[in-house]
Image (spheres, helix red, strand yellow):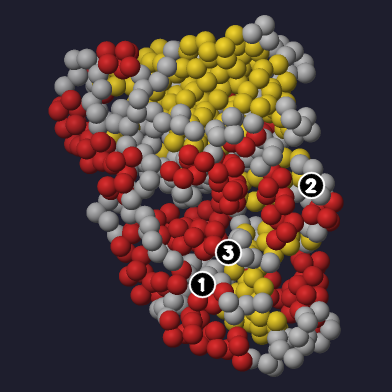
Amino acid sequence: MPLYESQRGAENRIEVKPAWRDALVLGPSRVAQVIVGLIAGRADRKRPLRLSFDGWYGIDWTALRLSLDQEASKTGQNLAWRPIVNVFHAREKIDEYKRAFTETDDPGFGVVNTDGCISDLMIPEKVVALGSELETIVHADAIIVYGAGASVPELLDFYDQCFYFDKTRQPLLWEMWDGKLVPFGWDEPKPDYGWKEYYYCDYYLLDRQKRALLPRMAYWVEAIAFERIKLLPRTAYDGIIQTLLQYPIKEVPIYQPGPWGAYRYQDLGGQFDVPGLECNAWNELAGPELSMLVDIGREAMLNLPTMNLMQYADQWLGQHIAETYPSLFPMDVWLDDGYFPKPTPAERISMPIHNHPSTDYVKRHFKEALGRYETYYIAEAYEKANTWMGYTDDADIEEWERLCRESSNCKEIPNWKDFIANWETNIGDLFLIPPGTIHAHGGNQMVLEMDTCPSIAATEYSFFTYDFNRPSWDDKTKTMTGKPCNMHLDHGFDNDKYCRQSWVKDHLRARPVVVKWTKDYQFDRYTSDPRMPFEIERYHFERHADADTEGKFMHIVTLTIGREVTIRSKRDLKLANTLRKWQSALVPACFGAYEFVNADGGPCTVVQLRWKKG
């Protein structure tokens, strides 16, 4: 799936201690000087400094080695390098290990590796031998073990210092899709590396290793691209992370073209001016797979995964979420484009007909912790704006399933509209989409989609049952000539609750209820369904509105009407961030009382997603 990022307007400017700001080391040359200087200045000159360079996938270890060797040669220092790949099992044995999570009877999904660790993929005797070498080697100034997994628990105590080399999600996915990813047990790209390997096994091994190492590392390294490498001592890194939690946080959004991709983004400019993006199906504004740009007052900004904040999950997400869903950031916000300049058939502008699984379903089938619960908030509506949801009251459900299975998206179902209920929409409409509810964005509208995220790895759980036998998007040719989407018919119908149109009308067409009204602002909350774990709320104001996380709720807020607002703390006005139209911000649970301020005046609406329990 092609994917684009836009960093325009996504920066988070925070004020940190001068010592933390000045500790940031920028660029390959300076990073090499600092690391080699650390080696040269070691207290015990009679033995080498023992270092581990651990990190995520996608780190350019070759460039790093070359840079450090060149710097060390200037002072006659000898660096002994030990690639951690040498202690891994044979590639065939690693593949066998992963098959338990990837080779399921379902080509669309796998099963989460809930308990594994990187050590599972290593030969114990070789790990012991490496530990012995770390203790006994003397003919070097430093011995450096490098690669993902270098700091497994069996080796951690042998090191004098550990470095963690970090990478954000999107560049890694580009490497994976291009066949350039080097996984566990490999010293070169694995040409047939499958997405299931990453999303159901390797991600979890990498994540557990990272979470264990962040509190124990000596240095954190931003290693997205070697030419822009940055280094921070852990004290400065921790200080910056904890300072970030005192601010509202914007993420770097991503954009994905697709078979129903539309064109409103071309009119919006700013963060929507994305080179190479020729149509826009999804635009993720907030969620676990995104990254943060952090300006601490230096020549370059930090770019780090948002999930690094999970180190302080109770402050960030609130105690209830942190304890109920360990390691999971369970919320997503998307902007689904739907504007077409000319009348266009429903079969082109609609999403696939699909539904989503419940918490019980994903636990049983995929070992995930949380189901997929969605909402569609209509943020803009054009002529013939519409949403598909539920079955018509007289639909023959058995016939619909028969037609879908017969089609398997390989041939059209001419009378598909006879089965799926259609709803005309307008700005402010909210559709509740609990698990098992058949639905689809119908086009001619902009949908602010606020959902749960079931997966630590941000795996998508949508069960497609019909996609109009249309071609998908080919991003190389920039045309709709790609292979039609695969369906998930067994999951889709196994999961279907067969909601009828009249039931949808009475239960899933939410309405806003005024919770608070003042002369400055109105705060309303939409009616809900008991199955939905989160609330959808809105602030309407011209100059000012008050809000409060109460120390226990993360707020994800999106500006849908208005040009720009400031979000600022009431206890300290310097703790603030700006939000432009169609941007989202994560307001940490620990933020407390705050306000929205519109310096320009004029109507503003901020739509808010928050968990029900706190």
Residue 257 appears in the figure: no
Q: Earlier in the sequence, mark 1 or mark 2?
A: 2
Q: Is residue 101 above or below residue 373?
A: below
**Residue sitting nearer the eye, 51 or 484:** 51
Q: Amino acid at mark 1?
A: Pro
Q: Is residue 614 above or below residue 458?
A: above
C-beta proximity under 8 Å, tags 3 and 1: no
| Left-right relation of 381 to 557 | left
Q: Amino acid at mark 2?
A: Val
Q: Earlier in the sequence, mark 2 or mark 3?
A: 2
Q: Residue at x 56, y 18 (%)?
A: 538
How packed is label 2: few (under 14 Cα within 10 Å), some, or many (20 or more)?
some
Residue at far top of view: 519
Q: Is residue 261 above or below residue 301?
A: above
Q: Earlier in the sequence, mark 3 or mark 1?
A: 1
Q: Is residue 465 above or below residue 35?
A: above
Which percent across, then down, holds residue 346? 38, 22
